[in-house]
Amino acid sequence: MYVPRGPKVSTPKLYSGTRNASSWAMRAWLALRAAGIDFEEEIVDIRRPQRFANLKAIGRFSPPAMVPVLVVDGTAIYDSLAIMEYANDLCDGRLLPIEFKLRAQARSLMAWQHSGLSGICSRISFESAFYPAKRTLTAFETSECEHLFGVLATHLNESGGPFLFGNLSLADLTLVPTIVRLIAHEPVTPSREAIEAWAQMLLAMLDIKEWLHDARQLPPVWLDDYLVPGHPIDMNVVVDPSTAP
């Protein structure tokens, strides 16, 4: 049972998405868990074709008609970033650094993820992390991984770890889905070793393991643009879900 901290409110309800297809909902869910907030959850099936009707129903109380959305006392808090900041407010700000410049840096990483980082290795979607077989990364995708890993390695070096800003923060949590999908494809880059301990620490967290375990029980959500010329995979390969990343 998660004990709420901060102002008393009625139990909020999080509308999240299909576990192996909803990286944005995962971020909000992880932040609420990390903040120790008690909440109800309704998982909205966002797979095609049912996603259209299901998200239209969400649009009746949330303007973007997307998940995640958190409903608190009848008020809709939509967008994962807003939900994560709300979670941080309810736990007295402990999910962001205290020092104001570091806090701004953490928010910079969150904003980067929100505004553009989701496009890194755009064919390597969150859904692909749960495919029974993976294709190799292209040279360009590998270079994109190295760019991100290098930035993260710098933060870890400056903070001394074990997380990006010393303690676990929203910056770490917002990057989890990106790390999950990239690490699943075993990128070989110069900076990979420098972030490996951090990445494995995240993947070992109980909340993250719970989400990923549930995701692995679902049928894969196949996306047509995953395959690229020269990088085929054998879709008939069957992998034991317990050994999947």
Image: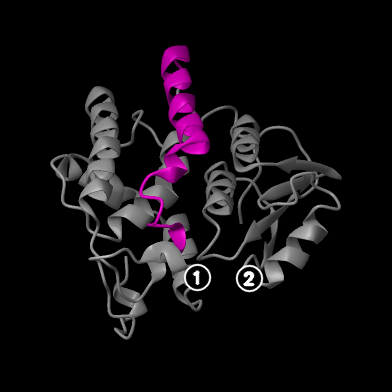
Identify the colour scheme used.
one colour
The magenta segment is 98-127
Estimate the x, y position of residue 15 in percent, counting from the top left.
70, 56
Q: Disc 2 designates what residue?
A: 48
Say if the magenta span includes residue 100: yes
Residue sitting at x 49%, y 26%? 107
Q: Secondary structure at mark 2?
A: loop
Task: Describe residue 205's horizontal placement relative to residue 6 as left or right.
Answer: left
Q: Quadrant of residue 168?
A: top left
Ranked by sequence position, the earlier of labels 1 and 2 is 2
Mark carried by residue 115: none
Q: Amino acid at mark 1?
A: Asp
Task: Describe residue 196's horizontal placement relative to residue 29 as left or right.
Answer: left
* Circle 2 residues within 10 Å: few <14, some 14–19, many ≥20: few
- Depth check: give the residue in front, 45 or 200: 45
Res. 117 in view: yes
Q: Answer above or below: position of 108 versus 138.
A: above
Residue sitting at x 26%, y 36%? 147
Q: Disc 1 designates what residue?
A: 214
Q: Quadrant of residue 63?
A: top right
Q: Residue furthest front?
A: 229
